[in-house]
Amino acid sequence: MNERASTTLVAPHAQTPDPKPLITVTDLHKHYHIGGQELHVLRGVDATIWNGQWVAVLGSSGSGKSTLLHLIGGLDRPDQGSVSFDGRDIFNLPGAAIDRYRNRHVGFVFQSYHLLPELTALENVLIGAMIRSSILGWSARRGEAKRRAVELLDRVGLGDRLNHRPSKLSGGERQRVAIARALVNQPDVLLADEPTGNLDEKTGQQIMALIAELHQQGQTIVMVTHDQQIAAAADRRLWLHDGELTESLAS
Amino acid sequence: MYKLTLILKYLRRKLGPMFAALAVMLCTAMVIIVISVMGGFLDLLQTSAKQLTGDVSVIARSLTGFAYYEELADQIEALPEVTAVSPVIGTFGMINLDGQTIGVNIMGIEPTDFSKIVRYENTLMWSAEDIYDRYGIEPNGSNAPTPGVDLHAQAMTLKPAAIDMPGVVIGVEVNPYHYRDEQGQYDFSNSAVQHEAALTVLPLTERGAPAEIGPSYLKAAVLNEFKSGLYDIDKSQVFVRFDVLQKLLGMDRRESKVFDPETGKELPGVSVRPARASEIVVKGAEGYTLDQVKTAVQETVTRFAEAHPNVVPPAVRTWEQRHAQFINAVKNEKGMVTFLFIIISIVAVVMVATTFYMTVLEKTRDIGVLRAVGASQAGIMGLFLGYGLAVGVVGSFLGLALAVSVVWHLNEIQYWLANHLGVSAHYAWCAGGGALIGAVVGGAIGYPKRKTLRFALMAALVLSILGLIGAWIILDQIDDLAYKLNHTISFKMWDPQTYFFDRIPDKVKFYDALFIGLGAILSSVIGALIPAIFAARLDPVEALRYE
Ligand SMILES: Nc1ncnc2c1ncn2[C@@H]1O[C@H](COP(=O)(O)OP(=O)(O)OP(=O)(O)O)[C@@H](O)[C@H]1O
Ligand SMILES: [Mg+2]
């Protein structure tokens, strides 16, 4: 995007040259019951996501891509199976550790941005950092967090829109704010659920360029899409079909 | 940290919970106003009652009084628990004022001592200066008090300065010519000051039978009138000097010659009948509880009774015991107010709960987002509880401010409602009617063009101003219209002619306000509790999908 983009924007250890498994998904199952019918969305999904990789998850609508992404991010709970982060099963962590996992190690980007309407762009980006610290801790960390948030917004091209509220931003701009928000705590992995789904083609391409750039800087990315063209830029493409995940051989 | 940020944002940006704050404000204000006014009344009653009797009284069990009261009074006064005592004689009698006779309680007091224990001096209604400047009475006019005479000083000695006659101070309602005007004020021109009053009492023998000499009469000059604030007292009590009443009732010390019952010959020596009083009023010393004072006085009375086996020992009563009805009324009212407070608190809880439930529904997706960014369940719960707390704090502060400004200006508000509502309503009707006609006509003319609304608004504005001008012209032309309007359209929430206190109590007690304010804040937090739990337990994925 621009030259002064600093490499500190992504987590430092994501840049280590030799990849190691960051997240391991083992035998993941998830069903839903609707009106007496059982819908088996995930039927034993296995996957390994390596540090620094950009993984695209493909599949038709309703195949369970979002469900899988939510499970990887610790937002949802599986009926069976595990998601290991750094060698530990995130669903077996004590107390509120899973919330901490989402806060520090994961960054979510959603199709419909999901910004908080009352907050400005800057505050939306800062929210993850605020959740991270207590009221007392905040006064000490505030300056640094704010600097980083401004830097991120600058980086996604919104340096002059810091105090605009989401209703005053276009869809593409909102998605950039959402990406900046996801990155504020330097997450190990960015989980993007059809980040260009609500955008026109041109804006979608800009967002994809931004994601590609993040990947170049070493950010691990898991991106859900049903658009093969978009998926083409990723390192790996995984197909979700009939509740199972298969590596696509065609590249 | 995000909780504080979001709460502050929501407080400024969200309307819904502001309605909850408004509800909390109104509840708080209502309870504080009711408690202040009602509590103010009860306090007035209670203090009046207390100040009319002194802390503790030693009371004769019979109208004939008890002997050796000076000795007992001295002993009681010597107690460390007691600062002042004063003997009193009370009896029933009649007073004739300007040809009207009514039954009264006649109290014989020593005004200076009595006033140290019982509120007497402050209840006196008239002073010469007062009368001159409040009623614009000519110093030499027919109703003027004798020039140069200090009514206050006279009442404090119960001796007229100029005439050789005992003085009497009567309760303001004893005077049959007094009435209160619309502001609840008495007019000096109807007062009995400087008039002659005739008192009739019935002396009793020591055994309580009517004395052979029959009723005694006393001509006295009315020196002043008093208003204690308790209607029953003001309607039925008059004060004369202790020694005057004592003599009149034959309760003073009498020496008589002694005769041999058989021979009828005079014997040497004299027989002494000691003087009697019917009550000793006692003021307790600072630092002692009422019970301690009472106990000390009771012990003294018991010792006194042992030393004087012939004297029926008088009873010892605290002011609370003497005014048990008032005290109980106060307690009942307090219970009522507490009940009201509980009901209103529940109302506040429900109000806050419903608005917060709506807010949580409205914010469901945001809750999902917060969870996705790492907020815990406890965090979400804390967010909404904190929001409830903030709404409670805002509501209760606003309510407090509203209540204080209303209570402090209650008398003005009441005065305005009672005296200007009619004319104001007239203006409002004219302006409102003009606006309505203007809106309809303007709308009709403008219809169906796109500017209908603006047209209607303009016409409404113009006609409402015309209405105001019209109203003003009408009021200006017809002389008593304003008076009649105000008279027919008025709201008297407080009629000083029926209530005995002439002002609505207008003090807010700090601890009442504090307690109610905290109660309101607590109610808001409780109201927010269930929505907060609901919000915390939302499934984040469902919440994100929520439309
Ligand atoms: N809470 C739920 N209750 C019942 N069924 C659900 C629930 N959540 C998801 N599903 C079902 O699970 C299936 C997978 O949903 P999911 O959102 O993961 O699909 P997706 O692959 O992301 O689809 P899309 O590409 O349209 O976003 C769908 O058929 C959906 O109807
Ligand atoms: Mg989806």
Image (cartoon, coloured by chain):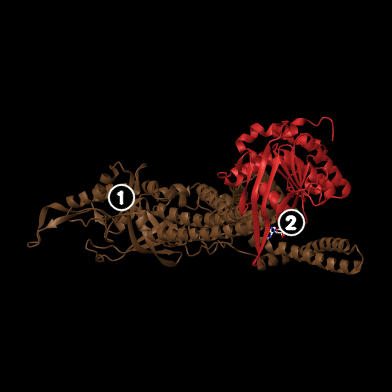
Chain letter matching colour brown: B
Q: Residue B513 at x, y = what percent?
A: 54, 50
CB of residue at label 1: within 8 Å of ligand 1? no
Where is mark 1, residue-wise? B294
Specify the colour of chain A: red
As drawn, B541 above or below B468: above
The residue positioned farthest toward the front in the image shown? A249
User: Which residue is located at x 44 percent, y 47 percent?
Assistant: B153
Q: Is mark 2 within 8 Å of ligand 1?
A: yes
Image coords of residue B36 (percent x, y)? 53, 54
Look at label 2 and name its amino acid: Ser
Marks 1 and 2 on same chain = no
Q: Give residue B102's position: percent from left, percent from top.
A: 41, 66
Identify the residue under disc 2.
Answer: A63
Kindly state the secondary structure of the residue where label 2 is placed. loop
In the picture, residue B434 is in which quadrant?
bottom right
